[in-house]
Image (cartoon, grey):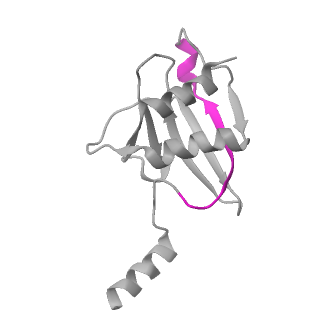
């Protein structure tokens, strides 16, 4: 019982990090990084806020269905992603999606930048269409 109480207290004081949250998402803002300056295929925007329920559902699926990568990987940051919740809190991620068939995406929680997650190909494809279609 004491261990459970200490864990709850610890989480309340420093915040337990989770890949996703059950809190309702109200918007997602993507900002492309300078890496795209040298790319042949560029995103359709430099910065865009997604707030439609359909768009949010796709991003939420990416967060919830992404699988943890066991080892620490080296990566370039392609997009900064800021998730805003109904209570006004925000969570920041690195999102890597490229405009190529058959790819999986990469999601990194910036609070724990050593931990990364692979986004399934089907969700990656939906995100790809949202990001690279003009």
Height in image: 21 above or below 58? Answer: below
Residue 75 screen position, x and y as percent: 39, 31
29 sits to left or right of 103 = right
Residue at 46% x, 53% y: name it.
Answer: 19
Residue at 49% x, 30% y: name it.
Answer: 124
Residue 57 screen position, x and y as percent: 61, 44
37 sits to left or right of 49 = left
Height in image: 26 above or below 58? Answer: below
Q: Which region shows up in magenta?
A: 21-38
Q: Nearer the viewer, residue 64 or 41?
A: 64
**Residue 57 can be seen in this image:** yes
**Residue 81 can be seen in this image:** no
**Residue that sits furthest to the top in the current view:** 40
72 sits to left or right of 27 = left
Examine the structure image and report whether residue 30 is included in the region drawn in magenta. yes
Residue 14 screen position, x and y as percent: 48, 71
Residue at 41% x, 87% y: name it.
Answer: 5
Q: How many marks?
A: 0
Residue 17 screen position, x and y as percent: 45, 61
9 sits to left or right of 2 = right
**Residue that sits furthest to the left in the current view:** 71
Q: Quadrant of residue 70?
A: top left
Residue at 62% x, 48% y: name it.
Answer: 83
Q: Quadrant of residue 105?
A: top left
Which quadrant does the N terminus fall into? bottom left
Which quadrant does the C terminus fall into? top right
Examine the structure image and report whether residue 29 is included in the region drawn in magenta. yes
**Residue that sits furthest to the bottom in the current view:** 1
């Amino acid at each position: 019982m004491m261990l459970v109480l200490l864990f709850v207290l610890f989480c309340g004081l420093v915040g337990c990090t989770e890949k996703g949250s059950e809190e309702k998402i109200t918007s997602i803002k993507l900002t492309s990084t300078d890496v795209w300056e040298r790319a042949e295929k560029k995103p359709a925007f430099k910065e865009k806020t997604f707030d439609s329920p359909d768009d949010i559902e796709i991003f939420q699926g990416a967060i919830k269905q992404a699988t943890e990568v066991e080892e620490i990987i080296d990566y370039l940051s392609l997009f900064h992603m800021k998730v805003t919740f109904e209570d006004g809190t925000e969570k920041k991620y690195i999102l890597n999606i490229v405009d190529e068939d058959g790819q999986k995406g990469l999601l990194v929680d910036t609070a724990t930048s050593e931990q990364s997650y692979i986004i399934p190909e089907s969700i990656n494809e939906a995100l790809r269409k949202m990001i690279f279609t003009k």
